[in-house]
Image: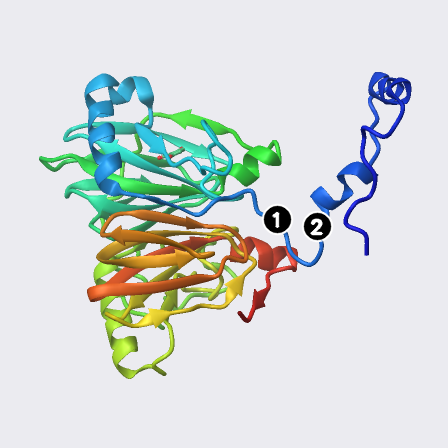
Amino acid sequence: MSTQLGTLEELPQEYRDAMSQIAVAPLWPQMRKVLPHDAPMPVTQAHCWAFSDIRPLLLRAGELTPVEKAERRVLFLVDPGRGAGAMQATSTIYVGMQLLLPGETAPAHKHTPSAARIVVEGEGGYTVVDGDRLPMEAGDLILTPGGCWHDHGHCGSKPVIWLDALDLPLFYYLEASYAVEAPLQTPRNRPDPSEVEYRAAGLAPARRRDIAPPPSYPMMRFPWKRTEQALREYARHGDNGIVELDYINPETGASCLPTLGFTAMMLRQGKSVKPVRRSASAVFHVIAGKGHSTINGKRHDWSAKDVISAPVFAAIDHVAEGDDAFLIRIHDAPLQEKLGFYEERNR
Ligand code: GTQ
């Protein structure tokens, strides 16, 4: 198996010019770059963004730029492997920290990419998704799937900050990304489906499926309180392995969004967790606790509200220090499964 397939430089200059002129190029000098042996060569570099670094700059954005002007007041997290301005934390995952000040609203829009929010700080924020008003409490996961109208508001008294996660890089690359704007929605005067139709795990409304098929996105809000409770019980009575729960569509059991997966994790204090190497890339958001993750040999220390990225096939060890830690892993396994290549490898 050759690793070197010939270079562009060894070809005569006049031949290279002739190719450029008619807009063609030889594959062989670039073949190994696009088809490396045995495993991909990720561009993504693992990184840890400390919330304590982002917060002051985000609050400053609140002074510098009114929300009316910004539409969405967000600082997005830039993969160091891609460099300045890259709207990617990994190959497929965009994440940003969004700020809404008391009394502000972010106008309604819908777009082709799907999004989800994880609430980081503050009380009184809400997102209206297709007419349902979803309260945003710390740690809640709020979905705004592609094609669903959403606007944000804030009736509390202190700044609200949440983490946005979108499959924007994929949609942008597909030349499929665009948004449609609209005025604020008038929310229905009832609690959201997580409080009504899907109040308890394993229960879903009985429907005449022939005339009323379940909605594609039946539940848009996953309250953190319930998730934490479920993780703690699972940790107490589960098989003592890795304590993880996937966020799923309660009607179908499929991932809660089409391309992005969300997995709640509990790390028991002092215990090292070494998951399999996955073909999916990941972004971890720390809900509570502190610890460190060694990713491909490099240690990243983290505490509550921080964000850590990991490239595809990363070897990752997590350790929670002091107390149990809770994280949400955002990943692209659902996309890879749909495309038929999701893979896990032993280390
Ligand atoms: O809140 O709708 O970070 O449309 C990027 C694009 C947030 C949003 C982002 C968006 C939004």
**Residue found at the far front of this picture:** 10
Q: Give residue 41's mark.
A: 1
User: Badge 2 is on which residue?
Assistant: 36
Colouring used for the render? rainbow
The residue lying at 25 percent from left, 63 percent from top is 325
Left or right: residue 103 versus residue 50 is left
> Is 99 on the left or on the right of 167, as rendered?
left
* Rendered residue at 25%/57% (across/down): 223
Badge 2, how many Cα within 10 Å: few under 14, some, many 20+? few
Horizontal and vertical percent position of residue 306 = 28, 47
Mark closer to the chain start, 1 or 2:
2
- Please tell me in which quadrant of the rendered image residue 51 appears: top left
Amino acid carrying label 1: it is Met
Kindly report the distance in space between the C-alpha atoms of the residues bearing marks 1 and 2. Answer: 7 Å
Residue 265 is at least partly visible in this image: yes
Percent of width and height locating residue 168: 49, 37
* In-front residue for pair 113/130: 113
In the image shown, does 280 or 111 lie closer to the viewer? 280
**Label 1's element?**
loop
* Rendered image quadrant of residue 228: bottom left
Task: Give residue 265's quadrant in the image.
Answer: bottom left
User: Residue flagged by tag 2: what amino acid is it?
Assistant: Pro
For disc 1, the neighbor class at 10 Å (few under 14, some 14 to 19, many from 20) is some
Q: Could you say where residue 90 lies in the image, as x and y percent from the top left?
A: 49, 44
Up the image or down, 233 lies above or below 4; here it is below
Residue positioned 34% across, 57% down in the render: 328
Q: Which mark is residue 322?
A: none
Q: Is residue 130 visible?
A: no
